[in-house]
Image: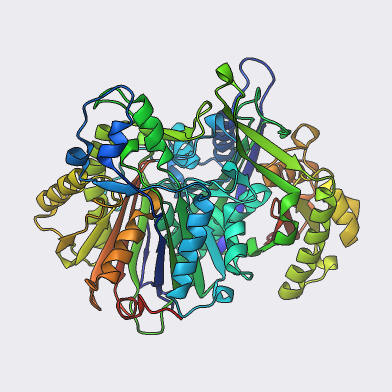
Amino acid sequence: MGTRIESVATVRARRGPLSRGALGLADAAARECLARAHRQPTDLDLLVNAGLYKEKSVVEPAFAAIIQEDIGANRGHPPILGHGTFSFDVENGGCGALTAAYLIDGFARSGSMRLGMVVASDSDPAPRTSQGYRFPPVGGAMLLQATDGDEGFDGFELRTFPELGGRFESGLQWEPGRGLAHRGHNALVVTEALEYGRRCVECATSSVHAFLDRARLSLRDVDLLVATPLPAKFPDALGGELGIDRDRVAHAAEELGGAHTAGTMATLEGAIESGQLARSRNVLFVAAGAGITIGVALYRRGS
Amino acid sequence: MLTELDRTEWAHVARIESVGMKLPERRVTSRELMASARHHPHIDLERLTGIRERRVCAEGESSFSLAVDAARDCLARSRHRPDDVEMLVCASITRSIGDTTHRFEPPLSLAIKEAIGARRATSFDLSNACAGMMTGVFVLNDFIRRGAIQCGMVVSGELISGLGTTAAREIRSLYSRQLASLTLGDAGAAAIVERAPDGRPGILVAGFTTISEHSRLCLGMPSPHHREARMFTKARAIHRMAMQDAPPLLGEVFGQSGLRLEDIDYLIPHQTSARAIAAGERELRERFGAGPKHMVINVEELGNTASTTHFLALHRYLSEGRLREGDKVMLLALASGLEIGVIVLSMDQLVRTHGHAH
């Protein structure tokens, strides 16, 4: 038993005064994802948010709990032995969505849940003061159903390369003497080294080889590569390094191209819309994030 | 509730093998904290909460340093080496490291893993307010029960007393939504969760749910204009909802596991205030017609240390030799969200090995 992907959805904020923040994006993506699978929010057992950058940088409660309330997933007290929803956040940069899928897949394997959803979204929490923030406002969701069938995730792996940890960093920095009345302020600072993208490709290449070796598969067995859009041009660069033909590399739609934590969903949706997913049996998910952290997962589609 | 019992078809049982902690040296009494209030709100904080003092970090300490020191303490009490840890989960609400007041990327877990030498571990951060560490144990329990890993660590470092500093500066009355921030103290905690040897007891049941209609009753966030963060809590409403929603869910867990409340030797609730815990105990006794043998209150000298409270209390009771093999200990999370979580442990080797360094 594992999980199969039941649906995926992404949302990009429009420009202008009605533009949505991370919460609105997450809510909209989650609702659309449920609608595409003809599911009700109350069907959800587990909701895991992997988004990082949100309104006011709220750190408590888990953002997933707020999303759960907004979409109406068993908001109130469930009846005894009834159906509730459990929500929490996972934070693992660009690998967050794949990490969340890993945990949901585990709870499905142990028979603890039937339906789980990964949600991720990012928006600049303070555009006037943030420095180096370049991610587009994108939300994504992926619905995972427990299954006994032949389609589903078949292995996850997260590898870290801490010796390359300083290549991408983000956090709030206290800047004395800045801001209102020069009282100082907390500013979001994002830094990315020029070589970060190249290093991610190197780390991902070795991670994929190690993963496939353990799974006793070769690159010829991989029908489709679904890689996060970030760092820039990562899917094509990784595909090239691995020797995977371009028609076996999925791409996110252009307007979703810089999606950060929702990147896995953005590329997967691109693969569905292009018809690549329908033609594939073994799908290799690869995510890259700060750390450097590389997530790899194999997804087998049914015959 | 999302519930995992120890008697399903899955072959393995998970147990807590070691508990570690780190407390900063500096102590700040409730009287000292309230003396810093700008608006003289006339609150007898110690009488109201039962918190006499809390630990507060010194310059140079951070969420990261607290977490690392707690993880090292945990390893020193464990038979495991850092290389045995296959999964490391950092569950802090606060994420300060160096000059960074809140780290987003890379995750704090990666820096902790490096610092303690757990090179083999899969690592990620998990955030679930004050239920974070218990949620981390819930995740590790799942991986261990189905044989995916044999040993994991959950760790948290909470440099959170700054919220109290901000609150003291801004609070005007007993009805302020920052009142709960005055209870907070700094601490780090860590726990190693491992596969129990065949036939040995461990985590009997673990269950969590989120009553999200109350998700906005407590919101914590960095302050744009102060170095320290801020938290706004409708404390009375949260307490009322927790009292209303927790007992039926506990009843559900008891029903599924075959346990009764009176079977619980020590109930460790989330440590907010002595008054709130006592009220909770009265409510439980009224609903169930019985209560646990001991209700653990550990706020007097530490205050509310956010996601670490359950493990500081467990550490203290182990250190004081109060727990016996076979005792059933219930950890009860009531956290912003509203997160309700239960983990029941059957005490085994931990009562003998706690305190034994390598």
| Picture coordinates of residue A246, whole percent (x, y) | 90, 51
- Answer above or below: position of B296 versus A97: below
Left or right: residue A264 compared with residue A115? right
Asked whether A294 or B171 is in front, the reply is B171
| Picture coordinates of residue B275, whole percent (x, y) | 18, 44
| Residue that protrudes farthest toward the bottom in the picture | B198
Q: Tell me if residue A110 can be seen.
A: no
- Answer above or below: position of A212 versus B221: below
- Answer above or below: position of B264 versus B352: above
Left or right: residue A221 compared with residue B95? right
| Picture coordinates of residue A78, whole percent (x, y) | 31, 44
Left or right: residue B267 compared with residue B283? right
Q: Quadrant of residue B6?
A: bottom left
Q: Quadrant of residue A127?
A: top right
Asked whether A112 or A243 is in front, the reply is A243
Which quarter of the figure is the C terminus of chain A placed in?
bottom right
